[in-house]
Amino acid sequence: MSRRIAIIGAGPSGMAQLRAFASAAAQQAEIPEIVCFEKQSDWGGQWNYTWRTGLDEHSEPVHSSMYRHLWSNGPKECLEFADYTFDEHFGRPISSYPPRAVLWDYINGRVHHAELVPGRLLKDAVRFSTAVRQVSSHSERGYLLTSEHLPTGQQSTEHFDAVVVACGHFSYPHIPAFEGIKTFPGPVTHAHDFRGAESLAGKDVLIIGGSYSAEDIGIQAHKLGAASVTFSVRTQPMGFGWPDTLQEWPLVERFTGSTTHFLDGRTRSFDAVVLATGYRHHFPFLAPELRLVTANTLYPDGLYKGVVFEGARDLYFLGMQDQWFTFNMFDAQAWFVRDLILQRAVLPDPQSQRRDIQTWLTRLKSVQSVREDVQFQADYIADLIELTDYPSFDLDTVVETFLAWKQDKKENILTYRDRCYRSVMTGTLAAPHHTPWMEAFDDSVEEYLREDSSPRYSALSSLTRQ
Ligand code: FAD
Ligand code: NAP
Ligand code: MG
């Protein structure tokens, strides 16, 4: 009987796993039966936007944390697939920071027409609107997986020889409590439930957190007319050159009604609070002994090569790292997992796996700068690509692009998305978008790709990096 492989989730990681198998199939490899379970009605994971918050139409926790006016927060040149370029998809240069819908279009474009076996689309391997409820080890070998078709409530339990967990880790919010917060009279929302800043116009907004969500939701609020934005940061201030109405304050100590008390003794009154306090790796569908337990880090302990679960056979996790790199890192991981499943690659003994993990963890501890941090993930990806036939690409130049991006943000946090970078895959220089990001309010695919407008930049060359 043919082996059966389960993939849990059809976000960018699960889609990378499907693509990896399709690419082996195109080279005449014999592919086991693949079943991908996706609880949403379409693929794309976080990039599959929903207006819903809390529970969805089936009373399932809503997955995506993205919002209406979300644009890429890093240059697209850093996440480009090595086997499907932006040029191939769009047929002409586009800007470096596309909006959410445009990136969904790109990841969908790579797999939309792909076939796993002749005449059978890759998409047919995905069971949509189907949530994985439970995965446990089977006594002999492999796993028993129970899934539920959400529209009908029908459950089925099946045997799989291997399981690839690709459910993402930015979906279950981390929600710390603050003294007196229940007396705050305005809305208190976690970033996971933030869908747009329109309702914050004219308001004094408090955002707790000092990372990407805090930064971008703060800028969204500013862009859509908030009276002021105060970031409350626990550890490291972001330190951007904020406009006057945006400020960084220390951590909140407590709330008394709408008055917020900060650790430095200052107080201030707000209309709304956003908790941009991050997410939890949470796997309610896995038997406890199969769960990865980790914080958001570049090298979760317990995963050989960042993907092979140490505690059980034939169990893999994709995309569980903190992310500088995204789509092309998921590809490198998926190609390696594919090769293990196809027995093209061989796992070393457990002691060697542990030594390899330990080497990475030791190196991670010694990281002292942003450059070393980005280089760490680049080297991790290079290590994986070395082991597979995923096309290798110039990771060192991508590291430089990340560092230039950090510098752009330091120079101007409101205009960094207007900069243009060069693809390491094709050499193509991004084209400036027809509208500066701060003035772009319609971020549909149609508006983004509209060609009939002349660019409204006054100094194009100053925005273009070679
Ligand atoms: P996800 O995209 O989270 O996909 C996981 C999939 O698994 C989902 O479709 C979900 O429905 C499914 N699933 C989960 N549980 C189950 C279950 N039990 N049964 C069945 N299906 C299940 N990255 C960038 O490169 N650029 C950006 O600008 C960017 N912006 C981001 C903004 C936000 C607000 C967030 C939260 C993340 C952002 N990211 C960005 C990072 C993002 O995590 C990755 O781009 C990417 O989406 C991760 O892919 P994934 O497949 O690992 O996980
Ligand atoms: P994150 O990077 O994990 O950051 C979590 C933040 O919460 C940290 O600043 C942390 O501070 C803070 N925090 C946690 N507990 C706290 C507490 N008790 N009190 C105060 N602060 C606390 O999570 P994220 O910012 O949500 O980013 C998640 C992902 O989404 C990233 O990959 C990011 O790139 C992506 N994203 C992208 C966009 C976009 O524009 N495209 C927008 C938003 C998010 P400490 O440092 O003190 O722990
Ligand atoms: Mg190779």
Image (cartoon, rainbow, N blue to C red):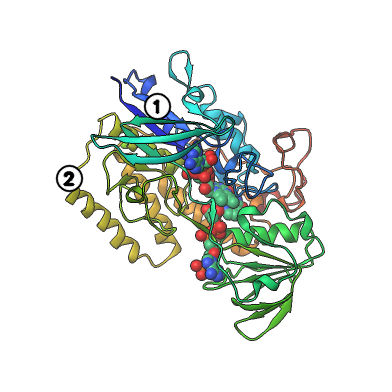
Q: Is residue 175 above or below residue 319?
A: below
Q: SS for tag 2? A: loop
Q: In the rendered image, which quarter is residue 222 located in?
A: bottom right
Q: Which mark is residue 201?
A: none
Q: In the rendered structure, which amino acid carries the disc numbered 1? A: Ile
Q: Residue 373, position in %: x, y?
A: 41, 60
Q: Residue 272, position in %: x, y?
A: 73, 66
For mark 1, does the 10 Å Cα neighbourhood hold few (<14), some (14 to 19), or many (20 or more) residues?
A: many
- The reply to whether residue 73 is visible in this rendering is no
Q: Nearer the viewer, residue 72 or 400?
A: 72
The N terminus lies in which quarter of the figure? top left
Q: Is residue 366 above or below residue 24?
A: below
**Residue at mark 2:** 349
Q: In the rendered structure, which amino acid carries the disc numbered 2? A: Asp
Q: Quadrant of ligand 2?
A: bottom right
Residue 26 lies left or right of residue 202; in this view the side is left
Q: In the rendered image, which quarter is residue 224 located in?
A: bottom right
**Residue at mark 1:** 34
Q: SS for tag 1? A: strand
